[in-house]
Amino acid sequence: MYLNEQLIHIGQSLAGIVPELFLALFLLIYLIAELLLHRYVNKDIMGRILFITTLAGAVLALGFVLGQWGETPGFRFHSMLFLDNIAVFFKLLVIGAWIFTLLHIRIVDYDFPTELNALLIAATLGLCLLCMATHWLSVYIALELVSVSSYLLVALSPSKKAAEGSLKYLLFGAISSAIMLYGISLIYGLTGTLDFTDPAMRFELARKVPFVMYTAIFMTFGGILFKLSLVPFHVWAPDVYEATPTPLVSFLSVAPKAAVLLVLMRAVSALPTELLPLLGGIALISIIIGNVAALWQQNARRLLAYSSIAQAGYLIIGIVAFTALGFESATFYMAAYLLLNMGAFLLIDLLRPRSQTILSEYAGLGKKHIWIASTLTLIMVALAGLPPTVGFTAKWLVFSALWDSYQAQGQPWLMWLLIVGIINAAISLAYYLRLPYLLFFKPALSQPIKPRFPVTVNIIVGTLLAAILLLFFKPEFLMVWIRTMSL
């Protein structure tokens, strides 16, 4: 390619990543503004100005991403990035999670260092790039940007537990990153390419000895499984969830999963189908471990950590079905899980603001905060997969896709995955309904103070409630949009 052609391609590529360029520029502007304001205004005024600035920047980024909807699918920077409607959809999920986190912080009145906003911007930038990555090198670089930002977010709290959690997060993250990098080198050595869309990757891997192929792919998926908190890269999740302030846990529990899920869908589509039983086994073990371990938890954040391990397994079910319906159901499940999980963390925090979220402390609060507690109960019912909630629709779709795949292929492992998934959905009722039981059927340990929630809280809670119910009765509102997209 001649120099003028390269310059034209670079110009076209830059025009296709406007939201990411804006986020990078916005990060620099924010850091400069923070330095200047620190010298001339007091801490409270600086905090309010920077919060408004960050929220405005998030809304602008959302607008830039929406402007990409309907663009002609195409590569950016050769095969490093690929922009299409499904990438735009997942970027909308990521930025939506960012905006929700900012509102959560403001509503519950957390006092975080101003560096928090810069770290969230950097993490969002990495996640948006990850949503477009179709090359293992771009996946790794974007994943590292997200990881480093995440480690610092966990360490923001001054408590000793947060320091321990961030250290554990860093150590396991570094190990998974090293394993992934070694796996990428194996993939390159075996195939001569790191491009998902290059047919040589699938062809060359399929020619190798199965053990070599499985080893290379499993190691390459190390960083992806870590972000999804899937077995065997899941052990960091409970301690990190317990140690990290609730709004930051809320963001880290869903936003990285959304971006990484899309990477996994693209990778699975480009790799030999022989890896599907491997992913199916990981999903099955994750569902069992997540649900069984959650039964003994006494902390709401740890409970939701083990829940996230199981929920990630259900996300993978849609992928291993390896059909159009399977990918669509996984996308629907991710959108529903983002809504439910962030809603659960917000409502838990509203009932016991800035607390350690010990389950026993929620006893009797349902009678004092009926509106909040009732919505939280509905969210827990939805996470368990019961009607009439979007959680039931999401599980129904992934199980339907798996059943259709079993009927078409007749593979016994697909049936085992379906049976174990359904049984574990029933087991999850035991811990998901524990919090509603405490809220409404146990006496309060002490006389709770009844705070007056602002109108903003009631609007957000009402919106959550409406979305959870509406997507059960009218799932086509979201599915029609998802079906217009393709990998």
Image (cartoon, rainbow, N blue to C red):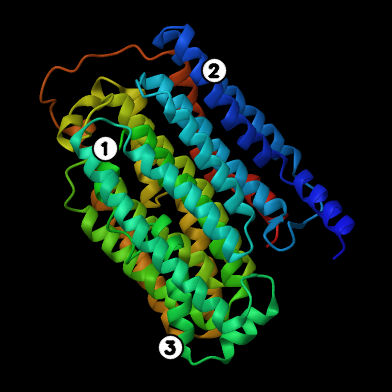
Check disc 3 and give the amino acid type: Phe
Badge 1 crowding class, 10 Å Cα cut-off, few under 14, some 14 to 19, many 20 or more, is many
* Residue placed most toward the observer, 177 or 321: 177
* Residue placed most toward the observer, 474 or 258: 258
Residue highlighted by disc 1:
436
Q: Nearer the viewer, mark 1 or mark 3?
A: 3
Mark linked to residue 387: none
Instruction: Please indicate whether residue 233 sits to the left or right of residue 217 in the image.
Output: left
Badge 3 crowding class, 10 Å Cα cut-off, few under 14, some 14 to 19, many 20 or more, is few
Residue highlighted by disc 3:
211
Label 1 element class:
helix
Quadrant containing the C terminus is: bottom right
Confirm whether residue 378 shows in the render: no
Residue highlighted by disc 2:
52
Check disc 2 and give the amino acid type: Ile
* Residue placed most toward the observer, 251 or 397: 251
Instruction: Please indicate whether residue 87 sits to the left or right of residue 46 in the image.
Output: right
